Image (cartoon, rainbow, N blue to C red):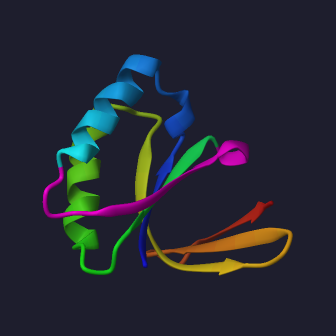
Amino acid sequence: MESIYIENYITLSPKQKQEFVIFIHNFKDLNVQKQQLIFCEESLLLEFFEKSNINKAYERLKTFFKNFSKIKVSIITDIISRSNYCIFTFDNNTKLRIKQ
């Protein structure tokens, strides 16, 4: 499963979130399998089906958020889930540990 992490997503206004939802549902060639809010990080995790082109999704999302200075879009290359935490590994090899 391919994933994209949108840092500070929760800080968007309701109108901006609505515009984003409309934008992402217009993807005909990219299929979002799951959306998960990560409240402790104010972020959104989008998981795509394997047949989706994650690089194409990443570029489109970066373009959508280019005028939002607080928003950062990253590709997650690995997720390790444990009973009380998750570790996300990003494409630049940085890691983020999130308590569940």
Q: Position of residue 81 (x, y in %)?
A: 71, 77
Q: Is residue 68 left or right of residue 31?
A: right
Q: Residue at x 14, y 64 (%)?
A: 29
Asked whether residue 28 is drawn in magenta, I would say yes
Q: Position of residue 73 (x, y in %)?
A: 40, 53
Give, as a single range, the part of the protein colored magenta.
27-41
Residue sitting at the far right: 84
Q: Residue at x 56, y 34 (%)?
A: 10
Kindly indicate the quadrant of the structure image that contains residue 74: bottom left
> As rendered, which of 9 and 18 lies closer to the eye?
18
Task: Pick the quarter of the image with the N terminus.
Answer: bottom left
Task: Pick the quarter of the image with the C terminus.
Answer: bottom right
Count the marks: 0
Kindly indicate the quadrant of the structure image that contains residue 75: bottom left
Q: Residue at x 38, y 18 (%)?
A: 15
> As rendered, which of 57 and 72 lies closer to the eye?
57
Asked whether residue 60 is drawn in magenta, I would say no
When the figure is inspected, residue 19 is found, relative to residue 61, above or below; the finding is: above
Q: Is residue 86 left or right of residue 100?
A: left
Q: Residue at x 73, y 45 (%)?
A: 40
When the figure is inspected, residue 12 is found, relative to residue 100, above or below; the finding is: above
